[in-house]
Amino acid sequence: MTAPFSDDQLFDWLRLIRSENVGPRTFRALVNQFGGARAALEALPDLARKSGRARLRIASEAEIEREMRAARAVGARFLASAGPGYPKALRAVDTAPPVICVRGDVAALAAPCVAIVGSRNASAAGLTFAGRLARELADAGFGVVSGLARGVDTAAHRAAPGATIAVLAGGLGRVYPAENEPLHARILDEGGAVLSEMPFSWEPKARDFPRRNRIVSGLSLGTVVVEAARRSGSLITARFANEQGRIVFAVPGSPLDPRAEGANALIREGATLCAAADHVVSALMPLVDASWIDSLEAQEVSGEITAEALWDELDWLDFGVPLPPPPRAPLVGIDLEEPPSQAPAAGGDAAEPEARVLALLGPAPVGIDDLARQSGLPIGSVNRVLTELELSGRLERHGGNGVSLTP
């Protein structure tokens, strides 16, 4: 049973984690060394001077009061890893955020969860599968976790808004991408939850996305990669899941589709193949019991990969004991930042419907109704584009009203 956690303790924890260069590792080391966050805050200036640092920015009381007022104004709650309500699965992660801010139904965090991640520029087949998978997992009693990004994330959240947890790269006051604000509101209205470890008004930066990804995987018993190119940021989430001792699933795709290269590679490396929700449920159900959290154990992974630490932490301080290694993610060559919205404006030129349909097509057959649904175009516009592609020799038709690009 979690010990009571006072408002004063929460305030001090927020001040410490919001201070300059204090990440989860340093936070834990400071609290352990000085017996609490308040004592650590009092000791930080002297530690900095002894280490040759003239100045270290410590979050002010006024700064934290402003953040707490802003959170309360929208009904958000702060949960500390040592306090009640904090997700058990996330608490088991070495780099768990000391404090998270949550909007929506906090009870959603107590359910066993599955992360669904994948390409922002997914095919219509990938988006349809992600939505179906999310619905069926929710029906089986699992929460669905993702990052509110475009593409696969959006499809997963949209299919099961009342059973979904969206993890933001920025603060709760900065929904990103902005086009998902209606989806964000729907998640809150229908009983889901939205959370972040970042300051309430924080604008997300490139390095915040992999930080978010380790929370997405950390909340979950398993992570499903639906579509991912070879250098997709979704593979960072899969790597974190593996390091956290969670099960990694991957949805196989056509070897002719670059959007499937990363997921196919995960399967070759030992990820569990996922072609239906039952593949996930049957693998995870044995873990869903009173003691499943005890089986979670961080694992070391090997392999040469260009990586970068996710925090600039206070390694120069003398804690008396060595710090654990910093969390790292492969950042070089990885697509981290969200691209500008590619949704065409109303009244755009005639080439836009073709571009939208082409972006959703691939070597795998997809239903025309799914194309219309995922593109947001009228069925007549979709059929016109398909006819033009077929006449130019770029489209193949299949049984069951399916279509695909010509290999």
Image: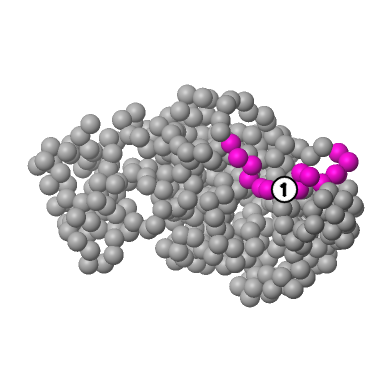
Span shown in magenta: 307-321
Residue 36 in sight in this render: no
Q: How far across and how far down the image is residue 238, in percent?
A: 55, 37
Relative to 404, is 190 above or below?
below
Q: Which residue is drawn at 29% across and 60% down?
A: 344
333 and 8: which is toward the camera: 333
Q: In this view, does 302 lie to the left or right of 176?
A: right
Instruction: Reply yes or no: does residue 316 show up in magenta.
Output: yes
Q: Residues within 10 Å of mark 1 (few under 14, many from 20)?
A: some
Name the quadrant of the C terminus: top left
The answer to whether any part of residue 344 appears in the image is yes
Label 1: element kind: loop
| Whether residue 20 is situated above or below residue 216 in the rendered picture | below
Q: Residue at x 64, y 42 (%)?
A: 309
Residue under numbered circle 1:
313
Q: Residue drawn at (65%, 37%), measured in percent from left and top?
A: 244
Where residue 5 sits: x, y (%)?
Answer: 82, 61
